[in-house]
């Protein structure tokens, strides 16, 4: 009996030791398992490649895209040029005429301002006979003092007044000042033609 009791007493602390050590061993194994799982997760996250989004077209869509014809914007239609009959050019000629006491250079189609022509109304046709000189590209007709049979045809366009001129009078130490404005009456005429000089003797230019 004593041997049996000694054997039991020797066995009991071993059992108690084994019973107390088991929960710690389970906890250690759990911690080791968790650490291994975390390390594996970090390794897997590092090894995973970055996601790339690429759109892949199917064969039918690619075929549709290639089969679409390229439409170009039609440019503006070029109309054929229509040839128009060119009008005959007038002969370039000028004249020097005397109106009143002044001399003017006139060209067909241009207008000039002269001193007031008494008795002339708007749209009246007038003839200037005092033609002192007629010139063209090739020759010159000089009057002595006027070119015989040469006339300048013109039409009256407007009867108006010239720009205002200030006439100021002043006398020193007399408190005398006079400010007067004046507008000279003038007539605008447009030259239509220069004729009748062809029969006169001409001076050919070199």
Image (cartoon, rainbow, N blue to C red):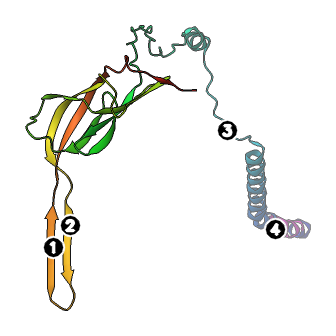
Measure how far apart labels 2 and 4 are at the Cα level.
138 Å
Image x and y of residue 15, in percent: 81, 64
- In this orientation, does residue 142 appear? yes
Looking at this rendering, what residue extends furthest in the right direction?
3
Q: Residue at x 55, y 10 (%)?
A: 64
Q: Which residue is mark 2?
A: 166
Q: Residue at x 32, y 40 (%)?
A: 104
Q: Which residue is mark 1?
A: 179
Q: Residues within 10 Å of mark 3 (few under 14, many from 20)?
A: few
- Going from N to C along the chain, the mark reached first, 2 or 4, is 4
Measure how far apart labels 1 and 4 are at the Cα level.
140 Å
Q: Residue at x 29, y 23 (%)?
A: 193
Measure how far apart labels 4 and 3 are at the Cα level.
55 Å
* Labelled pair 3, 2 in contact (Cβ < 8 Å): no
Q: Which label sits in the foreground, 4 or 3?
A: 3
- Going from N to C along the chain, the mark reached first, 3 or 2, is 3
- Secondary element at tag 4: helix
- Secondary element at tag 1: strand
Measure how far apart labels 3 and 2 are at the Cα level.
93 Å
Q: 31 or 48, which lies in front?
A: 48
Give residue 205's quadrant in the image.
top right
Measure how far apart labels 1 and 2 are at the Cα level.
7 Å
On screen, 180 above or below 106? below
Q: Main secondary structure of the magenta part?
A: helix
Q: Which residue is mark 4?
A: 17
Image x and y of residue 196, in percent: 31, 19
- Going from N to C along the chain, the mark reached first, 1 or 4, is 4
């Amino acid at each position: 009996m004593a041997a049996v009791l000694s054997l039991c007493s020797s066995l009991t602390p071993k059992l108690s030791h084994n019973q107390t050590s088991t929960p710690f061993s389970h906890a250690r194994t759990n911690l080791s398992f968790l650490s291994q799982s975390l390390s594996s997760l970090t390794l897997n996250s590092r090894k995973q490649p970055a996601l790339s989004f690429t759109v892949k077209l199917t064969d039918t869509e690619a075929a549709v895209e290639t089969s679409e014809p390229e439409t170009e914007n039609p440019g503006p239609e070029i109309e054929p040029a229509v040839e128009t009959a060119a009008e005959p050019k007038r002969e370039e000629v000028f004249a020097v005429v005397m109106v009143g006491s002044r001399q003017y250079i006139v060209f067909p189609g241009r207008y000039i301002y002269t001193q007031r022509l008494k008795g002339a109304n708007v749209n009246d046709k007038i003839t200037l006979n005092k033609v002192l000189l007629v010139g063209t590209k090739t020759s010159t007709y000089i009057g002595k003092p006027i070119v015989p049979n040469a006339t300048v045809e013109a039409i009256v366009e407007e009867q108006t007044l010239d720009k205002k001129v200030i006439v100021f009078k002043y006398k020193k130490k007399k408190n005398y000042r006079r400010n007067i404005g004046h507008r000279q009456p003038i007539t605008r005429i447009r030259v239509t033609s220069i004729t009748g000089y062809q029969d006169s003797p001409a001076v050919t230019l070199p």
